[in-house]
Image: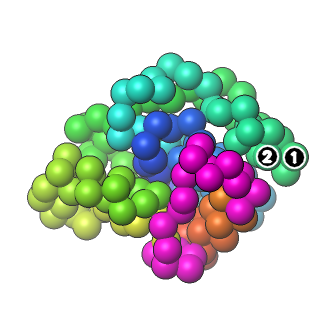
Amino acid sequence: MTRILFICHGNICRSPMAEFIFNDICRKKKLFHYAESAAMTSEEIGNPVYPPARRILSEHGISCKGKTARRIRKQDYDQFDMLIGMDRENMRHLAYLFPNDHMHKIHMFGEYSNGKEIDDPWYTGDFETCYDEILAGCEGLAEALK
């Protein structure tokens, strides 16, 4: 089983969407992988998934009930097989937090879809595009892990 940690700025939009979409794909395809998500910052810690993100997941039959934002921890590097940042800013922070990525665990989400970063829908308001891009990336990741 591959354990994945998706990381975004606040852990209330993109990374929890990726966590729940990826776990849903794995459940449906009977793949034995597991994902969680975390924030790079502390500003949303303890808050639930942002309502528009929760709504779009629900529209696709995916529940994120009980999820609250948490911050990434040093021990996450040892507890997860992959740490996947949603954008370049996340990647810069991950490189700072884990400067010696000797296990090559840190990846950008776009590696598994169209190569681009996932824009933060908190700022863009475009949760539909965000969902579609995350779905494509999660499907690409699941395929890469086969």
Q: Are marks 1 and 2 in contact (CB under 8 Å)?
A: yes
Above or below residue 129? Residue 23 is above
Instruction: Farthest residue to the top: give it.
Output: 46
Q: Residue at horizontal 65%, vertical 66%?
A: 133
Magenta region includes residue 118: yes
What residue is disc 2 on?
56
Q: Is residue 80 magenta?
A: no
Crowd class of label 2 (few under 14; some 14 to 19; many from 20; radius 10 Å): some
Q: What's the residue at 12%, 58% (across, down)? A: 100
Residue at the spot x=46%, y=58% of the render? 86
Q: Name above or below for residue 63 compared with residue 5.
A: above
Q: Residue at x 13, y 55 (%)?
A: 99
| Marking on residue 59 | 1
Q: Residues within 10 Å of mark 1 (few under 14, many from 20)?
A: few
The mark tally for this picture is 2
Residue 110 appears left or right of 92: right
Would residue 14 appear left or right of 6 to someone viewing this image?
right
* Coordinates of residue 61 in the picture (x, y in percent): 86, 46
